[in-house]
Amino acid sequence: MKIHILTIFPEYFESPLKVGLLGKAIQKGLIEINLLNLRNFATDKHKTVDDEPFGGGEGMVFKPEPLYRAIQSVKEKNPSTHVVYLSPQGRRFTQELAEELSQKEELLFICGRYEGIDERIREHFVDDEISIGDYVVFGGEVAALVIIEAVSRLIPGVVGRKDSVERESFTSGLLKYPCYTRPREFMGLKIPEVLLSGNHALIEDFRRKKSLEITLKKRPVLLHRARLEGKDYEFLRELLQKQRLYLFLMHYPVKNKRGEKVASAIASIDLHDLSRLARTYGIKGVFVVQPLEDQRKIAEELIDYWLSEKGREYNPLRSEALKLLKLFATLEDAIGKVRELEGEDPVLVATDASPKRDFISPEELRELLWEKPVALVLGTAWGLTEEFINKCDLFLEPIWGRLDSYNHLSVRAAASILLDRILGIYSFQKVFQFSD
């Protein structure tokens, strides 16, 4: 493979291209690197390659003429050269993209600086735009090095053992398992016994499970494209069952339209829909807090019917979901039940349609689920009272309207959206349903 790098700082690459496996690959001729100094394509005596942007503003912009001449100098020798502009607006660089680029015969990386390049070059003479991440660096040189290293590893002969490339993080779709070396014990810390067993099948199983666990906890989105087998899914399900999320549906203390603290009535549709939602997302239970005895009695009759033989025969799916529904007179009773089941109190996470205090994101709540039981507290009527919200441990980011601030949702709709934001990323079942 031949790689051209267009830059105003060719000296930036002097050391990185000489060391390690990349340096050896270049020496062996497996990869050819051609450094192009953009200033050599300027025609004025000062070798000017940038100018002020039209319309004003800070910074400088690379001029179109030197860029065009540089691109054409490469294209004249090989018209199929793939021209890549390293830009924050580009496609996010991934292992899949590295594999795509490794199939190209020649690559030309344009290393931008300052405010970027003239739009006419970007629009008409660039084949691809790539970003290595959502952060700001001085220029495209560091991005070029990142991509060159990732692509070079995929060129046959660059890495000695083919299986070491295939086992790398992201190539298999999973993050890599933990690695250990001598000594066996360090500061009282021992390596896992299975690695000393000499049983290669057990070691492979251990490493596979560790990769699955690390990926699930740190980058679960990768699992949607990973090459998974049935036993992998079973192991992931075992891990996910360790997350302890409950829904608390509060009928007191909530507020009415005038902002007064009241106890609201139970709506049977809430019981049906929230229990089905809980079953779909695999949460531990829906705990309904209702201080009014007559209201609890109505709900108990509904639950008893669906759990009876007649209800189970009529709609077994509804019956299965309603097993998750429990009724409590007070919040303390509901918390006590979680304590009984989990051995510790849940973290109370309040919700509301508007931000009542500093909030955490669904992603942060997802991470918390690996450490503690969590009760996501939903208010009926016009929502939880602010006094109650302030007593909760955390407050979850509200659901924002797409076009304006309107987000007046039913408690069922809000719960569905919030649960999908928190747990939807773990929905791997589709991988197996459609894998054939």
Image (cartoon, rainbow, N blue to C red):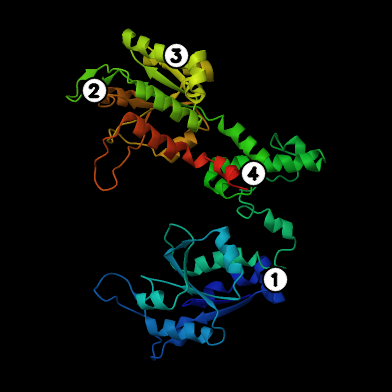
Give the left or right position of residue 155, taking residue 368 as reference.
Answer: right
Residue visible at 49% across and 26% down?
373
The image shows residue 284 at horizontal and vertical percentages of 50, 25
Give the left or right position of residue 68, taking residue 161 as reference.
Answer: left
Question: How packed is label 1: few (under 14 Cα within 10 Å), some, or many (20 or more)?
Answer: some
Residue bearing mark 4: 211
Camera-side residue of 390 and 249: 249
Q: Residue 305 carries which label?
A: 3
Is residue 348 in view from this perspective?
no
Q: What residue type is labelled 1?
A: Lys
Residue visible at 42% across and 20% down?
287
Question: How packed is label 2: few (under 14 Cα within 10 Å), some, or many (20 or more)?
Answer: many
Residue bearing mark 1: 24
Mark 3 or mark 2, earlier in chain: 2
Q: In which quarter of the image is residue 43?
A: bottom left
* 2 and 4 marks in contact (CB < 8 Å): no
* 2 and 1 marks in contact (CB < 8 Å): no
- In this rendering, which labeled residue sits more in front, label 1 or label 4? 4
Q: Quadrant of residue 262?
A: top left
Q: Residue 255 carries which label?
A: 2
* 1 and 3 marks in contact (CB < 8 Å): no
Label 4: element kind:
helix
Q: How far apart are marks 1 and 3 (CA)?
A: 74 Å
